Amino acid sequence: MTITDYLAALPAPLRETAEKTRELIDAALPESTSRMYHGHPVWFLGGEPACLLKAYKNYVTFGFWHGQDLGDTSGRLAPGARRMASVKLATPADIDTDLFATWLRGAAGVANRS
């Protein structure tokens, strides 16, 4: 399964949300590579996982492997295991283009320090 296949199989509201987020990721991280990893789309920087999209029944998780290192002041990134952090997106209205671009730039910076 490809990332495109994964996203195409999602129900309409989640598919639109995930596709729009994918576009933001691809634009902000042109140096990344992406592939299906552990059953969902993951973007890699320097060979290390940087961010992910993972669909659930009612939302798509947009997460970062080193999300707790991003210095998020918005309060939207919820900390997870280890240094991960993520946000739940139910509709395209949940996408904050400028904020997400800031997070993605931060993820690239964290990857460059690793």
Image: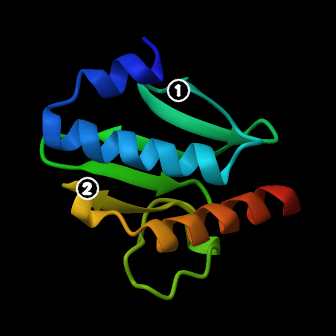
Q: Position of residue 10 (x, y in %)?
A: 21, 29
Q: Quadrant of residue 113?
A: bottom right
> Residue at 85% across / 58% down in the picture?
112
Name the residue beneath numbered marker 2.
Answer: 92
Q: For mark 1, give the secondary structure.
A: strand
Observer able to see residue 87: yes
> Residue at 39% across / 84% down in the picture?
75
| Left or right placement of residue 10 versus residue 49 in this view | left
Q: Amino acid at mark 1?
A: Tyr
Q: For mark 2, give the secondary structure.
A: helix
State the CA–CA distance, disc 1 to disc 2. Answer: 24 Å
Q: Position of residue 92 (x, y in %)?
A: 25, 56
- Image quadrant for the C terminus? bottom right
Between 85 and 25, the residue placed more toward the observer is 25
Name the residue beneath numbered marker 1.
Answer: 37
Q: Residue furthest top?
A: 1
User: Pointer 1: residues within 10 angstroms few (<14), some, or many (20+)?
Assistant: few
Where 19 sits versus 40, above or below?
A: below
Where 101 sits versus 1, above or below?
A: below
Q: Position of residue 13 (x, y in %)?
A: 16, 43
Mark 1 or mark 2, which is nearer to you? 2
